[in-house]
Amino acid sequence: MSSDRFRRSVIAIALFAVASVTLSAGSLLGRQSSPDQTAPIAPAQRPLPPSAGHLSRSPLHFALPRSEYVCAGGARIVILIETKAARLTLNDHIYNMKQLETASGTKYAEGPVVWSSTGDEGFLEDASDPSHPKKLAGDCHLEGSYPLASSTSSSVRGTVRYGKSPAVPPDAVLIVQLRDLNRDADDSAAVLAEQRIPMAGRKSPVSFAVDFDPAKIPAKVPFAVFASITGHGKLLFVLLSPVIIADISARAPLQLALSRATSNKGKTPPSPEAPPHL
């Protein structure tokens, strides 16, 4: 009896030892295969939403033609050109403008506010009162542009003087023309290029820039610059001696001095489209 009890005790101890080893191994394997019990997994990082004050910058915004002007008094104008439209910024004020039809130069407008430019010069004015337009930015000169301005165009530049402080009517217009001297004065084809500048609110001298395409002007043709100021259907001032240009590629600025036109009662004044060919 005593030997049987001894054997049963040994077997029970052995079974208990085997069970303990099995449980210990299972517990160890369980801990190794459960990484969530050791260190928590960092949640997947998600892109943060843009802040409310962030402005989206589209590549198209930077692809638009851009011109920057410096104006009198240090004012700065930046213009982004779209199809028949422009976004003009004067300092911190933005104007969304539409292109206007014009005989010469370029014009964009938002209501009564009009941007006018010819060549590398321009001005911004508020014509709410047509008889007394308010100059918002004057004597603006192109400082830079993107893309770079095309070199296929050129211009005849200069200033026009017409007295110290002459009074001109509100509808007065300065007309500067580049003409072909081989043609008759009344031949419309003689006018190769022209600029018309409204004189309301302007003072002498007035800057001009008559743009032209050299490729469209015949070589070895005598040219001359004509200028006049008309108003109320009358010729007010005229350049008595047109300036002959021997070399159309010359870029030296011209200085034109207009004389007051003599009154011819009962006679029709010369047409603004064709200043007198003297």
Image: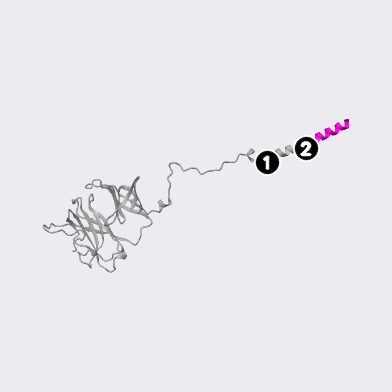
Q: Is 101 in front, or is 243? A: 101
| Circle 2 residue | 18
Camera sees residue 230:
yes
| In the image, residue 160 above or below residue 94 | below
Quadrant location of residue 221? bottom left
Q: Is residue 49 left or right of residue 93?
A: right
Q: Secondary structure at mark 2?
A: helix
Quadrant location of residue 242? bottom left
Q: Is 222 in front, or is 100? A: 100
Image quadrant in which the C terminus is located: bottom left
Residue at left offset 87%, top offset 32%: 4
Task: Give, as a three-letter code, the residue at label 2.
Answer: Val
Camera sees residue 138:
no
Quadrant location of residue 186? bottom left
Q: Marks 2 and 1, how far apart in space?
A: 21 Å
| In the image, residue 156 above or below residue 129 | below
Instruction: Determine which of the numbered discs, if any, sits on residue 32 in the image.
Output: 1
Q: Main secondary structure of the magenta part?
A: helix
Crowding at label 2, few (<14), some or many (≥20) Cα neighbours within 10 Å? few
What range of the chain is rendered magenta?
1-20
Residue at left offset 75%, top offset 38%: 21
